[in-house]
Image (cartoon, rainbow, N blue to C red):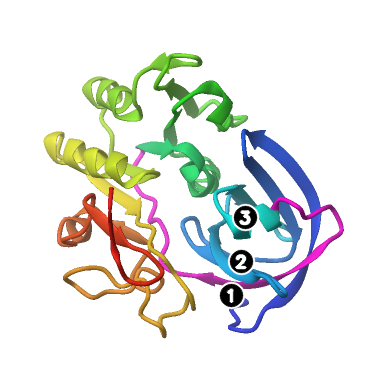
Amino acid sequence: MNKTEQPEIAEIIDIKDEAKDIRTFTFKYQMNAKPGQFFVLWLPGVDEKPFGVSYQDDEKFKATICKVGPFTEKVFELKKKDKVGIRGPYGTFFKLYGKNIALVAGGYGIAPLSFLADAAIKKGINVNFISGARTKELLVSCEKDSKICSVFYTTDDGSYGDKGYTTDKLRKVLETQKIDCIYTVGPEIMMKKVVEMSDEFDVDCQLSLERYMKCGFGICGQCVVDDLGIRMCKEGPVIDKKLAKMIKEFGKYKRDSSGKKVEF
């Protein structure tokens, strides 16, 4: 694993529009990440921020990024052949097991789960991939060229796929199949409902809990959670549901860059 706390230079070799304000950037860089881990993207003279890995092979990796603020606005100005700084990979990762799993993605939370789906397919694990967004224009495709990956789409307004929420589709899957583990990434309110549903059906669940990060490797303490005090960049971002339910703030609030509570 090539892990460094100093940025290494990587070239952007491809950029693809996925949905409204969502793009996938391909970097010529050997990341050696595991599904669920993150890296830190550095733009000299601007800032650096953490992002998940959505794909990798021996020569390149991809990150699917949503334009949500000043930093990502600068990222969206980047072109092919531009160079950026890369640190990582960091954090915990999803643990694959079982014969039949469910992936539940909300919005651009699809990125690390797409990477996980690739790993599951390689192991011969059957995948039920559920991806949801508010509307069709915000929905990112998660199609896989595999007979053991079934894809389901939901939109709040019914403009594509089933009308409703990812959790509605998850319930139908759990009612009709034996699922060994649920993996979820997306809005925290959605993930909390997924955890509650996993309890209802007595199924294991793993999730990726996002918190404001600065250093990315456990020094600054910016991403600690109440009341456990664990760091989401080191003991997370991927955690199991047992640990998630011990985190007082899970599904209720998070903290901004100043440490102020922000309710969901």
- Helix or strand or loop: what does disc 1 sit on? loop
* Magenta stretch secondary structure, dominant: loop
> Can you tell which quarter of the image residue 60 is in?
bottom right
- 28 w.r.t. 136: above or below: below
Residue 24 spot, x, y in % from top left: 67, 46
CA gap between label 1 and label 2 equals 6 Å
Q: Which percent across, then down, holds residue 142?
A: 56, 33
Whether residue 164 sits left or right of residue 6 in the image: it is left
Q: Residues within 10 Å of mark 3 (few under 14, many from 20)?
A: some
- Residue 62 appears in the rendering: no
Q: Position of residue 15 (x, y in %)?
A: 76, 46
Closest to the observer, 44 or 143: 44
Residue 114: x %, y % from top left: 53, 42
Disc marking residue 72: 3
Tell me the kind of residue under disc 3: Thr
Q: Earlier in the sequence, mark 3 or mark 2?
A: 2
Whether the residues at callouts 1 and 2 have beta carbons within 8 Å, the answer is: yes
Magenta residues span 76-100
Q: Earlier in the sequence, mark 1 or mark 2?
A: 1
Q: Residue at x 24, y 44 (%)?
A: 192
Q: Is residue 96 left or right of residue 119?
A: left
Q: Tag count in the figure?
A: 3
Q: Is residue 51 visible?
A: yes
Image-quadrant location for residue 141: top right
Residue at 19% in and 35% down: 197
Give the CA separation, mark 3 to mark 1.
27 Å
| In-front residue for pair 82/124 | 82
Residue 3 vs 135, above or below: the answer is: below
Residue, disc 1:
1
- Whether residue 209 is in magenta: the answer is no
Q: Which residue is mark 2?
A: 32
